[in-house]
Amino acid sequence: MNSQINVRLSEELLIKVQEQTKKFGFSSIQEFIRETIREKVFGESLSNEELKLVKRLTTLIQKTNAYGTETELFEKL
């Protein structure tokens, strides 16, 4: 069973949340908030080896300019 809660945000915080929701491709503010809470409660889910792989991939992409812009990179991911 899921429970529903109501959250009040200042106008400034709401604008920031809307920007982040769009920037990271969430379908709604509710989805963004759920994922943010999961990250805070359960912490980082990547292992050290996975983090090393991500860092190596990021370095390689930056060196070769494989996808050009950040937007293009996220579209490929």
Image (spheres, rainbow, N blue to C red):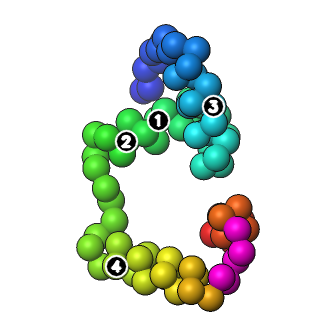
Of the numbered discs 4 and 3, the one sitting upstream in the chain is 3
User: Is 40 situated left or right of 26 in this image?
Assistant: left
Residue 16 in the image, given as x and y percentages of width and height: 57, 30
**For the residue marked with disc 1, what is the amino acid?**
Arg
Residue in the image at 67% along x and 83% along y: 66
Q: Secondary structure at mark 3?
A: helix
Within 10 Å of the Cα at label 3, are there few (<14), some (14-19), or many (20+) other Cα atoms?
Answer: some
| Residue located beneath label 2 in the image | 38
| Residue located beneath label 3 in the image | 18
**For the residue marked with disc 2, what is the amino acid?**
Arg
Disc 3 vs disc 2: Cβ atoms closer than 8 Å? no
Quadrant, the C terminus = bottom right
**For the residue marked with disc 3, what is the amino acid?**
Gln
Residue 24 in the image, given as x and y percentages of width and height: 60, 49
Disc 2/disc 4 C-alpha distance (Å): 22 Å
Disc 1/disc 3 C-alpha distance (Å): 14 Å
